[in-house]
Image (tube, rainbow, N blue to C red):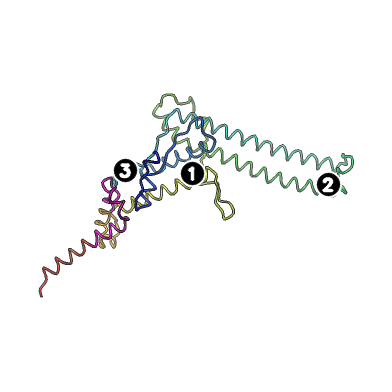
Amino acid sequence: MASKDLTFCKDSNIDQVLNYKSITFGEGHSDGGYAIRTIEIKRFNKIKSLCEKFKELTGYEVPYTECNASEMNLLVERGLSVIDAAYKAYEEALADAKRVENDIAQAHKGKRSGFGGYESLRAYLQDLEYRKDRVERHIESAHKLLTERRELLGMLRQQAEILSASNAPGLMPVILTRIPTEYLTGCPIKETFFDKSASPIFYAWKELDALEAAIQRIVFLCTIPTNKYELNNGGEKKAHYYREYYSVQGAELRQRMTAIDYVSSKYQHDQSFINKLLMMNSSI
């Protein structure tokens, strides 16, 4: 959707949905593009029934580009490359640990000429222990990153199974053997007061959280409630008016007022009319 096609109205929920941008992954994109698209594909499979309900109630399709075999091949290849880089970093961390342990063993055996700038063997060993602690922390973080990179690729498995089951032409042979069964169930990167993360993974997760919340909100408002109290207080009529507001035909209306203002004014008008009828049919 080009910028000239952006729609802005008085309701942030429908703006959030209709102005969502789905961008397919191409060879020219970086690893960040792979991460964003992978998360998007998994998250959209998760909310597929919600999107269908949204279309049924409003007439709008949530703007999303389906993943085809060609794109899936590119994503998996990039994912395997990302995992390989993480694995090499993990192996290097393990090698660092072995080097430090060897230095400590050699120092205890006295197989070192002098102390290499250290005042004593004790000072040298103390520094080696500090190095060992740092390396061990590095191993832990490198292993965690490797696991997360595998689980990121695993987010493509469901879509790959769908494409494989439909015999999508051009799909990489035995593609499912290359995709892990485990997948990210939550965002591995957290925003803190000190770290306003600009990570593509965090960005995609936050964007899709906001999109899903907006769709859920609209579906909730447009659905007739089952709660007796809400039904007794105009729940059915209010849901009908929310559908009017969020429908394709309500586009011009949304430029003038918010959803709550529209529904409130319509419902109050109904109540005023009912009250007038009651008064006209009552004795004086």
Q: Secondary structure at mark 3?
A: loop
Query: Left of 276 or right of it: where is 128?
Result: right
Q: Residue at x 68, y 46 (%)?
A: 137
Q: Position of residue 167 (x, y in %)?
A: 40, 26
Marked residue nearer the N-terminal end (2 or 1): 2
**Range of magenta residues:** 242-268
Extreme residue in the front direction: 4
Q: Is tag 3's residue or tag 1's residue first in the polypeptide sequence?
A: 3
Instruction: Assess whether residue 259 is covered by the magenta stretch.
Output: yes
Amino acid on which the number 2 mark rests in the picture: Tyr
Which quadrant is home to the N terminus? top left
Specify the label residue 124 is tagged with.
2
Tell me the residue that label 1 is attached to: 204
- The answer for how far apart the CA atoms under marks 2 and 1 are is 46 Å
| Mark sitting on residue 214 | none
Kindly indicate whether the residue at mark 1 contacts the one at mark 2 (C-beta within 8 angstroms). no
